[in-house]
Every structure is written in C-alpha cells, then in structure tokens.
Image (tube, rainbow, N blue to C red):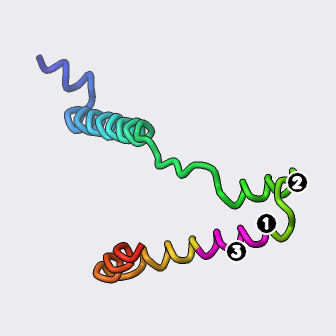
Amino acid sequence: MTMWPDLMGSGWEQQLLMAIGILCAVIAALRALAAAADRPFRDEGPDPLLTLWHRYEEGDLTRQEFQRQKRSLRERRSEGEAESQAPGHLRRGLAERS
C-alpha cells in the first residue's frame, strides 16, 4: 500500500482537489455564459431617425418635412429622458397629464 503515494508524488491529494476546483470553476463560468446568451435582450425596434432618413433619401419626405419630423422626434426623446430622470412624484404627475 505504500506504493500509491510514491507513484503519485507528495501532495497529490491537494493537487487533485485543486484540479477538481478549477474544473468546477470553468464549468460554472461556461454555464453562466450560456445562461446569459439564452436571455432575450430588449429589442427596441428600428431607429425612428434612421427610418426618417431612409424616407427622405427615397423622396417620400421633403427637406422641410424631414427637418420638422426630426425636430419633433428629438423633442419627444428629450421629454422621455426628462420624465425618466424626474423624481417619482413628478413622474406620476407627468403621466397623469398625458
């Protein structure tokens, strides 16, 4: 029975435990990456400004229409950002007005 420790070398128990620990850590990391890849990301849909630009390029919008719609889109975005940054009681008031 004294053959096995000499065959594996001294400290083989710690090395075996360390190898198992490293293997478990790698498997956990791969599982975490796989779980993150399975989560659906929030699809915001097509960019409205890009859609406007394509319509302008194709001739569906005149320059004045494009500028007006771009301005209104920016205003809506800035209002949305202002509402999202407002404190909770102000957000409720803004929502009630809409």
Q: Which residues lie in the magenta part?
A: 66-75
Name which residue lies at 78% across and 58% down. 53
Query: Where is residue 11 shown, x and y percent of the image?
Result: 22, 37
Q: Amino acid at mark 1?
A: Phe
Query: Where is residue 19 shown, x and y percent of the image?
Result: 30, 35
- Disc 2 on helix, strand or loop? loop
Taking the magenta stretch, the answer to whether it contains residue 73 is yes
**Disc 3 and disc 2: Cα gap in Å?**
19 Å
Q: Amino acid at mark 2?
A: Gly
Residue to which mark 2 is pinned: 59
Residue to which mark 3 is pinned: 71
Query: Where is residue 1 shown, x and y percent of the image?
Result: 11, 16
The crowding category of the residue bearing disc 2, from other C-alpha atoms within 10 Å (few below 14, some 14 to 19, many at least 20), is few
Image quarter of residue 34 = top left
Taking the magenta stretch, the answer to whether it contains residue 29 is no
Q: Nearer the viewer, residue 89 or 39?
A: 89
